[in-house]
Amino acid sequence: MIQVCCAIIVNDHKILAVQRGAESSHPLKWEFPGGKINPCESAEQCIVRELHEELLIQTEIVLRLKSVEFEYPEKHIELIPFVCEIVSGELTLTEHVASEWFCFDDWQRFDWAEADYELIVKNYPKLSQITP
């Protein structure tokens, strides 16, 4: 099983979604930013590193949510979510093709990657309280 961290970044009562590129695995799907945990790295270290690499921002972890396991045809992942806030930096996409801040009530208008969709469904009560 591959362990992957993702961030539900909250800013001004909105959450950040990012879109994968056409040539990526899960082409043009929307997701929460993050990535795979490296050997000898904690989940917390991973999400801070990934957000700096992918978005050029420094973040602070606010809360760790319940992880979900998802079986893709080619891999089995554990998606470990963190609620985060931006501490510094200007949001700049280095790996994704688009980003959008949204109110949680509008989450269904995105074509989510399957694991991220499962994450939203399983953590819905907590996520719906993040953006009133």
Image: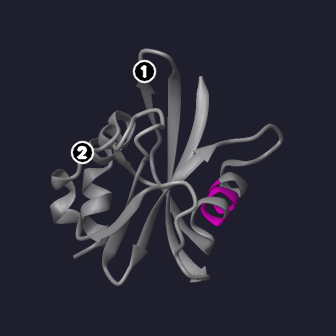
- Write down the quadrant of residue 99 in the picture: bottom left
Q: Residue at x 42, y 21 (%)?
A: 72
Q: Is residue 58 magenta?
A: no
Q: Is residue 50 magenta?
A: yes
Up-down relation of residue 19 to residue 75 (above or below): below
| Image location of residue 6, percent across then percent down | 51, 51
Q: Residue at x 63, y 71 (%)?
A: 56
Q: Residue at x 33, y 34 (%)?
A: 114
| Image location of residue 19, percent across then percent down | 38, 53
| Image location of residue 126, percent across then percent down | 32, 59
Up-down relation of residue 125 to residue 77 (above or below): below
What residue is pinned by disc 2? 111
1 or 2: mark nearer the eye: 2
Mark 2 is on which residue type? Answer: Asp
Identify the residue at the far top of this view: 73
SS at badge 2? loop
Quadrant where the N terminus is found in the figure? top right
Write down the region rendered in magenta.
47-52
Mark 2, other Cα within 10 Å: few <14 / some 14–19 / many ≥20? some
| Image location of residue 104, percent across then percent down | 23, 64
Label ID, residue 71: 1
- Image label count: 2
Mark 1 is on which residue type? Answer: Glu
The overriding secondary structure of the stretch rendered in magenta is helix
Mark 1–mark 2 distance (CA, rounded to whole Å): 18 Å
